[in-house]
Image: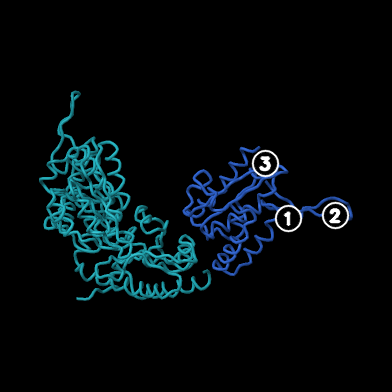
């Protein structure tokens, strides 16, 4: 799904596309923040900071086999539901800060979306954040498994 | 003569590797697998370039050369382990070797309620086969605990567990703790009650010479890839009289004498247990590896690794928040250092170390009962080998201090 930022041309009163990207607007600032990092260590620090800012945490007491993200080297758990307005709500928790940080950003992206929008979202924001080099194949698999778990849940809610 | 570490390093092309982030590789995951010297890589390439063929099958020149190389490697490897070629069964590694004891000996010689003694320190490879045998044959599996203060086997509990034992399976050296168990005493005590002994020497063989015949052990399981050889091959060393008690495990081609529509008769000796096309290139590579290792006095190699581990563990203990599991400075320790930081989760720490070029292992190390005994889900593990240097461990400690200050 392509997200477009548009503005109104005041002369012909038509909408113009200012920016096109494959993630929702609320990630723009975060992606910019990561892209501005001087090096990988700074990106890690930022990711560790985001790990502390999970908007919808999943308490450790709720972690079980059913909500575990398999194929992730650390303990990562995700529970998805619809809120009272019928909007998507992802709660998540992990023991590793790297994973928790990525979950935070994913939660910021998907919370409040419709289930269809979640299913159509692509995990490209991790690349845009400059984390491509950070995510070795095994770590990337963990991230993608988490992302897939979220999308599978969204699919079942459509 | 002191080891010339720089000359040793020159034999390992991979040690010059620069990682994608521009950092020089520092390889501290040797307990998982060692790197391979040029002579091993060349021996395997030469096989594929010059005489690749199936062994023990055809009469053409290449097949003769492949067969000769496979068997010459068997002679070389068995001699390195202080035994004869007839006592060496090629397997895919130590895991298959232990399964071979379970299925090729246990299934034919153990009955319901027979006792197998293992320890909390075992790798899953030396736990799960016995649990499976317990399910199918009703054998009792007894675990000997570790003393969590000294990180050593509780030998008093071992003595108690031995009562009525038919088989004792013990790891030579722990892949997590680096602890070298009192194998000689364990073999003596086990034989005194009439039990057979299997030693899992996957971690022991890279650190000291295993002399099978004089060890008295009935079975020893070894992996090639932790001692400079390729992955995919290992062996089970078996006493001659014990091998005679074994029956087929995996069946198929090569291990048969005659197959008819009515049934099959089997080969004798190691041939009974080596079915299918052998791992020819791998055996040749392992043969080259033991020849390369044989030029060193393993006591000197051990002393070098032990020096690195002692220095590193002392420095680690000086970093606030770090706890070590085991006693890496013990004179018998293999140089594996398991540790945790109380403020940085183990996966995070491993990732941050990787960013600095340091390859360490993280996880439960396929030893979950040991993790349970230690009360932790996982550890970080730095493990050293022959080619690691003081410069590398100094750089490691410096970088780790920097990480801990920045991220804890």
Q: Chain of mark 3?
A: A
Chain B, colour shown: cyan
Q: Position of residue B178 (x, y in %)?
A: 30, 63
Chain-order first, disc 3 or disc 1: 1
Q: Which residue is mark 1?
A: A19
Q: Chain of mark 2?
A: A
Q: Quadrant of the N terminus of chain B?
A: bottom left
Depth check, front residue: B237 or B200: B200
Left or right relative to A139: residue A4: right
What is the distance, in whole Å, between disc 3 and disc 1 at their CAs? 22 Å
Left or right relative to B406: residue B115: left
Chain A, colour shown: blue
Q: Position of residue B261 (x, y in %)?
A: 20, 23
Q: Is residue A55 above or below residue B312?
A: above
The reply to the same-chain question for discs 2 and 3 is yes
Q: Is residue B137 above or below residue B398?
A: above
What is the distance, in whole Å, between disc 2 and disc 3 at their CAs? 31 Å
Residue lying at the far top of the rendered structure: B262
Q: Position of residue B60 (x, y in %)?
A: 18, 42
Instruction: Find numbered disc 3 in the image and state the secondary structure of the residue it sits on.
Output: helix
**Residue ID at (30%, 65%):** B150
| Badge 2 density bin: few <14, some 14–19, many ≥20, Cα 10 Å | few
- The answer to whether any part of residue A25 appears in the image is yes
**Residue ID at (17%, 41%):** B271
Find out whether the residues at labels 2 and 1 contact each other: C-beta distance under 8 Å. no
Q: Which residue is mark 3?
A: A116
Depth check, front residue: A146 or B149: B149
Q: Which residue is mark 2?
A: A9
Depth check, front residue: B150 or A95: B150
Left or right relative to B301: residue B338: right
């Amino acid at each position: 799904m392509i997200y477009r930022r548009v503005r109104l041309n005041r002369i012909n009163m038509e909408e113009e596309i200012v920016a096109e990207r494959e993630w929702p607007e609320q990630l723009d600032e975060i992606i910019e923040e990561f892209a501005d990092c001087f090096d990988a260590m700074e990106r890690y620090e930022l990711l560790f900071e985001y790990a502390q800012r999970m908007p919808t945490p999943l308490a450790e007491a709720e972690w079980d086999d059913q909500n575990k993200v398999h194929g992730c080297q650390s303990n990562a758990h995700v529970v998805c539901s619809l809120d009272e307005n019928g909007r998507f709500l992802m709660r998540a928790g992990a023991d590793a800060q790297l994973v928790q940080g990525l979950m935070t950003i994913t939660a910021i992206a998907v919370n409040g979306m419709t289930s269809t929008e979640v299913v159509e979202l692509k995990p490209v924001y991790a690349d845009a954040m400059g984390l491509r080099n950070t995510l070795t194949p095994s770590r990337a698999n963990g991230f993608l498994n988490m992302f897939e778990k979220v999308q599978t849940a969204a699919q079942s809610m459509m | 003569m002191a080891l010339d570490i720089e000359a040793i390093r020159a034999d390992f092309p991979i040690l010059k590797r620069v990682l994608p982030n521009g950092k020089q590789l520092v390889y501290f995951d040797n307990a998982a697998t060692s790197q391979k010297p040029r002579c091993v890589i060349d021996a395997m390439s030469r096989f594929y370039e010059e005489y690749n063929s199936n062994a023990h099958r055809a009469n053409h020149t290449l097949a003769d050369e492949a067969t000769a190389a496979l068997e010459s490697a068997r002679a070389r490897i068995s001699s390195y382990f202080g035994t004869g070629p007839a006592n060496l069964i090629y397997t895919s590694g130590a895991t298959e070797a232990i399964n071979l004891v379970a299925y090729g000996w246990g299934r034919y010689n153990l009955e319901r309620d027979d006792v197998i003694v293992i320890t909390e320190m075992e790798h899953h490879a030396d736990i799960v086969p016995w649990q499976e045998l317990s399910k199918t044959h009703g054998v009792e599996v007894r675990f000997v605990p570790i003393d969590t203060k000294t990180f050593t086997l509780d030998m008093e509990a071992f003595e108690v567990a031995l009562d009525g034992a038919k088989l004792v399976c013990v790891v030579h050296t722990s892949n997590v703790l680096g602890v070298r168990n009192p194998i000689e005493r364990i073999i003596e005590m086990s034989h005194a009650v009439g039990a057979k002994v299997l030693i899992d020497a996957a971690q022991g063989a890279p650190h000291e010479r295993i002399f099978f015949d004089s060890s008295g052990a009935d079975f020893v399981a070894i992996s090639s890839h932790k001692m400079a050889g390729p992955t995919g091959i290992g062996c089970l060393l078996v006493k001659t009289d014990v091998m005679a008690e074994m029956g087929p495990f995996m069946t198929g081609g090569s291990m048969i004498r005659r197959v008819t529509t009515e049934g099959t008769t089997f080969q004798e000796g190691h041939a009974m247990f080596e079915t299918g096309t052998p791992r020819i290139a791998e055996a040749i590579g392992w043969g080259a590896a033991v020849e390369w290792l044989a030029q060193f006095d393993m006591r000197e190699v051990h002393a070098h690794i032990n020096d690195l581990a002692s220095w590193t563990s002392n420095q680690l203990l000086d970093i606030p928040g770090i706890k070590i599991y085991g006693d890496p400075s013990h004179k018998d320790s293999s140089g594996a250092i398991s540790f945790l930081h109380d403020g940085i989760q183990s996966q995070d720490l491993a990732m941050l170390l990787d960013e600095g070029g340091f390859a360490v292992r993280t996880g439960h190390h396929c030893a979950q009962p040991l993790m349970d005994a230690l009360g932790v889900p996982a550890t970080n593990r730095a493990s050293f080998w022959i080619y690691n240097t003081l410069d590398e461990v100094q750089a490691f400690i410096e970088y780790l201090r920097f990480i801990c200050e920045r991220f804890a």
